[in-house]
Amino acid sequence: MQNQKKNLWLFRESRKATIREHFLLLVFVIAGLISIIRLANWWFKKDHIASLPLFILLSLIFWYGIVRIIFIWINYLNFKKPDKVEAEVGLRVAIFTTSSPGEPLSMFAKTLEACSKINYPHTTYLLDDTQDPKFKELASQHGAVWLELVGLPGAKAGKVNKALSLTKEDYVLILDPDHIPFPEFLEEVLGFFKDEKVGFVQVSQAYYNQYRSFTARGAAEQTYAFYGPTQMGLHGKNCAVAIGANCTFRRKALNSIGGHGIGLAEDLITAIRIHAAGWKSIYHPVIVSRGLVPEDFGSFCKQQLKWARGVHEVLFTEYPLLFKKLSFWQRLSYLTIGTYYLVGATTFLYLLIPFLYFWFDVLPANMPFTEFLYYGFPVLAVAIFVYLYVQIWMCHKEVESGFHWRGMVLKFCSWPVFLLGFLLSLVDADVPYIPTAKQAVIGKITPFSKPIIIQIILFLITLAVVIYSRRFIVPEATLVMTSERVWGMIAFSSISVILAFGGIYAVIESRNLKEEDPWEKVKINQINKIS
């Protein structure tokens, strides 16, 4: 029974929420809003201001995070699961999967074999630019149509658009090559297209290599809430977004926007354009395929840099152009998604505050740390409780539920990457589209680890100076007056340092990972079989 609950290769789906569960969630959200109002009433006091410019800056970054929490709660209240619709017989369906130079052939053997076993009649296309004849042979072996698409601009999206011009099917599933689909995949999504206004159907994204490393587990943990209650809330207001994998499009919808969007966040570009064109989106919370997450810290950071740069591109370019064509909820959701990676800038500013105080005696606010805990803890408690409560709607809660602390560690340690992506977007710098590594890159220390190493060193030096000066230099009267402030700052800094050490662990582990091709262990004939 336990193996059945943990089995990654069984069909999974989220369940619907009861009226009672919706009501309880509303009660929790109201309690959270009351605690936020209480915190705001304490925060914005005149005697808390030490430096007005810095206090304003601190307030902006702090309340940016609080407002995002409020938006998340409101989104949860829009939670909705669509009723499955049986697929019509005889629809013309294509599956597009792309290959790029350097990607392992053996991985495609599993993906194409799984595509050949999908129940609903379809045609699988391998969009290939490897110039390796073995890929053509492999496609033929599994009944797929091989299309050689070399030298096209636009990376993956460019190949998809060229393939659209060469094919005629009415519905197109875009499947990343590292994802292994289940036999019932198309049967789960095609029925929704009976509604002529539906432009795309997105299903959950799940993984089968998250147990390979700390990084892999953390990367997967960062997605669980999004592919569960978050996307279900977005679906409730016709705001569900397309993801790079596992999304099935109506060809007419893609044609109406000039084809698949091209960019580092091509899925988000495509989604916002389809919504702006008046099409509906469906999020069907089922697991009907499993793919890969990055296994080493360096590959994870490269993926995050690409996404951070791409999402900001959508925020600064697509969002203003399409703003008037979006509904109120779509505007709000794309704004929230588009500003997610600003956490890199806000985290950097948070990290600066203690160092500004210890090294330059500059303080943005006169807030007793104990009072901050008194007013802030209820907000944190409700936020954690709501986060755990909505996990009852995850697709595979036996695996996906929990505090997701590894994901939190990786998110914190990625702040330099997020910040870099934001800065690159401000100057409109190009970042090459590099497919996420399908195998762990081992034996190297990634340069993305340098900022968190510097942070730890600066903290340890600062801590040593503070202890020495308070032991031998600072007068006793000053010690008493500044004790709460100094040790409050140390405690504040220590939290980030603990998270940084978690990142260092991920870096060291990544260097020493054993080589493995996780797809080699997957037995296609055992998918959806009880074990």
Image: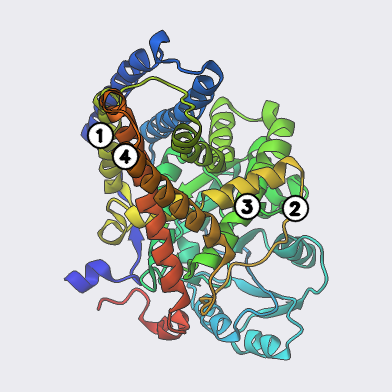
Mark nearer the N terminus (2 vs 4): 2
Residue at 72% x, 51% y is: 261
Q: Residue shown at 38%/64% (left/top)?
A: 217
Q: Position of residue 395 (x, y in %)?
A: 34, 55
Of mark 4 and mark 3, the one earlier in the sequence is 3
Q: Is residue 239 visible?
A: no
Q: Is residue 417 above or below residue 333?
A: below
| Residue 6 screen position, x and y as percent | 26, 68
Q: Which of 434/86 is in front?
A: 434
Which amino acid does the dot numbered 3 rest on?
Asp
| Residue in front for this viewpoint, 360 or 238 | 360
Q: Secondary structure at mark 2?
A: loop
Q: Nearer the viewer, mark 2 or mark 4?
A: 4
* Residue under numbered circle 4: 472
* Disc 2 target residue: 259
Per the image, the residue denoted by label 1 is: 381
Kindly state the secondary structure of the residue where label 1 is placed.
Answer: helix
